[in-house]
Image: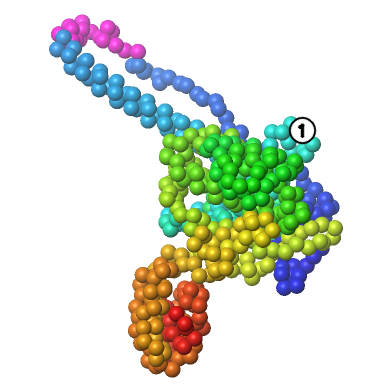
Amino acid sequence: MSTKRNNGRYSVADHLANPNSSRRSKKSFDRSAYVSNPSNSSVNSALPGSHAGRSAAGATTAESARYAKLRKARKRKKIITGVVVGVVAALLIGVGTAFAYINYINSQINGDVDKETLAALVPTDTSSDPFYMLLMGVDKSEARDSSGEFGETYRCDTMILALIDPKNKVVSLVSLPRDLQIQNMGATASDPVGYGTQKLNAAYAFGGPALVIQTVSEISGVNISHYAEVDFDGFTAVVDAIGGIEMDVQWEIDDAQAGEYVPAGKNILTGAQALSLCRSRHTYDEVGDGDALRTAYQRQVVSAVAAKVLKSDVATIVNTVNSVVQYVNTDLDVATILGIASSLQGISSDTIYTASMPKTSQYVDGLWYDFVYADEWKEMVNRMNQSLPPAETEVDEATGIVLSSGGSSTSSSESASTATSPAHAAASVAVRNGTETSGVASKAVDKLKTFGYTNLSSGNANSTDYTETIVLYDEDTYKTDAEIIAAQIGVGKVQKNDGSYLMSSNVMVVLGTDYSG
C-alpha cells in the first residue's frame, strides 16, 4: 500500500481493498439496517361516560318547549351562521389538507433517514448561516435491482460538497473523486483500523450515508449540516419533474454504456439525457480525463436544476418535491427546502461557483487511486468557508467543457483570488499614497469600489519614498482581507502591523512606485 505522503502530496483515502485486508472488510452491508419500518397501526377508543350521542330530542320536556320557542327566532340567524361556519369549515379543511399533504411528503422524503445519519450532521445556529450540504448519487436503479447482476451492495459514485450561503446568495459546488484513497475508513478510538484502506465511494456500501458524511467531513475539515441522496431513477425523475433543463453541451455524448445520446449545442435535456451526461466517461477516452470531464458536467447539471427550481413558485416547488419523494432521501423537510429556495431566489450566475478537489492519480498495488494535493485543497476549503470562488475559471482546451467556474464575471485568465465576498467587502480599508505622484490613492480607492468595498478612505502616507506597496492588517482575522486586496490591486507585500504604522482601519494600503494603477 502507498504511504500517506507521496512526492509532497498526501493521501486522505484509498480503494476497495482485498476482502482479507481488514477485519471489517468482510462485513456485508445490510441495507435494512438503514431503512426505517414505522408501524401504520392506529388505535381508536371511546371515553367512558361520553355524551357524544346526546341531542335535543333526549332532553327534558321543559328543555324541549324552550327549544321550540327559540327555534323560530334563531332560524334566520342560523342560516347566516351556517354560511359562516361552512366557509370557515372549508378553510379549515383546506388548511388541514395542506398540512396533511406536506406531512405526507415529509414522511416520504425523510422516511429512510436513520439515526446514524442524523447524528453525523451538524446543524447551524440559525437558518441564515452558511452551511455545507453533501449531494450523493448512488449507483442503483430498478433496472439494476431487477437484473440481480450486481447484488444489493451500492456505491456512492457521485459526491458534491456544496456550500450554501443564503444571506449572501452564494453557492459553491465542489466534486469529490470517487477513487480518493481513504485510510482506516470509519476508524474509531476502539477500532483504529476501521474498514481498512478503501476508495471514497465504498463508504456508502460499508456504512450508508452516515459513513459518507463522516468521511467527507473528516477529509474536508468542515461540518456538514444537510445531505440529499438520489439514485439513477431519482435523478431522471427530478429533471423530468421540472420539465427538463436547458444546457449548452460543449461535447456530444455518444456512449452506449451511459445511455441516451446527447448532441452538442444548446439543448433542453430530458432526465435520461441529463443522466447520460453525468455518467459518461468513455466519450472522452481519446481527448482527456473522463472522470474530470464527467464530474464537470455533473456540476453543470446540478446548477441548471437549481436555477430552474429557484424560478418556480412555492406550489410548484412543493409539487416537484412530491413527485420525486420516492427517489430522494434527505434530512430536509418541506419547510426547510422552501426556506432555502426562498432565500436563494434571484441568485446570480456570478455567485454560483464550481470546482473539483485538486488531485493526482497513481497506480498502487494493482489499483488506481486518487490522492489529494493537500495545500491546494486546504486553500480551496478556506475560500469556500469565506463564500469566495473555490477556484479560478478553467476550460478544457480539447472539449471546451468548463472544468471550474469562478462566476461569469471572472474570466479564465483572472485569478479567483481577486473575488470579494460580501463579508470581506465590509472591512474598513484606508489607502495612503506613498509616492510623489498625486491622485494615486484616489484611483486605488475607485478600483476597490468596483470589487464591492464601501468602507474606504484615501490620503497621503507619512513619506513619499515608498518603492514597494505594503498591505497591512491590524488583527489576524483580517489577514485574508489583506491578501485579497493585494491580489485585487495587483501588487503589495502583505504583513501584520507591528505598531510601526498608525491604523484606524482593518486594512491599510500604502502605495509605492510599483503600483501602476
The image quarter containing residue 453 is: bottom left
Tell me residue 191's x, y (percent).
Answer: 72, 57
- Element marked by disc 1: helix
What are the residue bounds of the magenta stretch? 53-71
Principal secondary structure, stretch drawn in magenta: helix
Q: Position of residue 311 (x, y in %)?
A: 45, 44
**Closer to the camera, 451 or 161?**
451
Name the residue beneath numbered marker 1: 147
Residue 154 can be seen, yes or no: no
Q: Position of residue 66 (x, y in %)?
A: 16, 10
Q: Is residue 80 magenta?
A: no
Residue drawn 45% across the image and 80% down it = 517
- Describe residue 88's horizontal placement relative to residue 446 as left or right: left
Q: Is residue 209 above or below residue 52?
A: below
Image point 37% across, 30% down: which residue? 95
Q: Is residue 119 left or right of residue 438?
A: right
Q: In front: 293, or 499?
A: 293
Mark 1, other Cα within 10 Å: few <14 / some 14–19 / many ≥20: few
Identify the residue shown where x is 78% and y is 39%.
150
Query: Where's residue 218, x and y in %?
Result: 63, 60
Judged from this view, the residue extending furthest toward the front is 265
* 139 vs 192, nearest the viewer: 139
